[in-house]
Each structure stands twice: as structure tokens, then as C-alpha cells.
Image: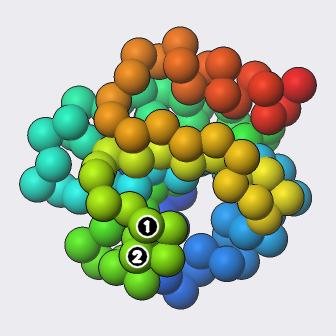
Amino acid sequence: MAENLQEFTDANFDADVLKSSEPVLVDFWAPWCGPCRMLMPTIEELAGEYAGKVKIGKVNTDENQQTAAGYGITSIPTVMLFKDGEMVDKVVGAPPKEHFVKMLDSAVG
């Protein structure tokens, strides 16, 4: 996993995402999901580009079903942006990188 990319789990989601002082982009994914694997390089690039401004990480929905169910994740990849403990943006599928740049810039701007 990329250096600036974090692994969020059922155990750390509350502390690392909801109580974070900076915006958090969360990629809900699974290893068997083709579109998730296609999206991974984009998420890794963003983690490097937004280091220090936005926390970026992934939730493996197979291993962290409680968190995935709690947010109603029925299709993956689903990417959610959290700010001040609230989900402020969401996208399902694998849009181009520019879509995520706009999401993140609105959160940090």
C-alpha cells in the first residue's frame, strides 16, 4: 500500500475518520472487485498529492462489514468524503481523477 494511504477498519474508523481534524477520503473496496483495482492507482496518487491536507485511506468491505453496512455500502467501489465527522460527498464507481480533485479541493479550500 502507498506510503500516505491508510487502512481504516471497524476498530479504528471512529477515531481515524469521524474524529479526524482534517478531511478524510475513504475508499470502500474489496480485493475481488475489478473496478476497485482500477481505481487504486488514482487513490494512491491522491494520497501522495494531498498528504498533510487530507487523510486518504481504504476500507476492505470483506474484512470490515460493520462499517460498510453502517454506511449502506451496496456497490463498490464507493468513495466517501468526511469532514468534521460528517459525510459531505460520495461517489459510486470509478470516475476519473479530476472528479476526486474537485471533491478534495472543495473540502480543503
Residue 92, horizontal then vertical, whole percent: 39, 40
CB atoms at circles 1 and 2 under 8 Å apart? yes
Residue at image location 84% in from the left, 32% down from the top: 108
Placement of 89 over or under 12, stated as above or below = above
Residue at screen point 29% across, 50% down: 76
Spatial CA span between label 1 and label 2? 5 Å
Residue 69 versus residue 71 in the image, above or below: below
Image quadrant holding the C terminus, namely top right
The label on residue 72 is 1
At 15% from the left edge and 48% from the top edge, which residue is drawn? 33
Image-based side of 27 in relation to 87, left or right: left
Q: Of the residues shown, which amino acid type is indicated by label 2?
A: Ala
Counting every numbered tag in the picture gives: 2
Amino acid type, callout 1: Gly
Q: Nearer the viewer, residue 55 or 108?
A: 108
Nearest to the observer: residue 55 or residue 109: 109
Horizontal and vertical percent position of residue 48: 58, 31
Residue 51 found in image quarter: top right
Q: Is residue 53 above or below residue 23?
A: above
Q: Is residue 73 left or right of residue 70?
A: left
How dense is the environment of label 2, judged by Cα within 10 Å: few (below 14), some, or many (20 and up)? Answer: few
On residue 37, which mark appears?
none
- On the question of residue 71 being in view, the answer is yes
Residue 4 seen in this snapshot: no
Q: Residue at x 33, y 35 (%)?
A: 93
**Mark 1: few/some/many CA within 10 Å (<14, 14-19, 20+):** few
User: Against 78, is 96 above or below?
Assistant: above
Q: Secondary structure at mark 1?
A: loop
Residue where numbered disc 2 is placed: 69
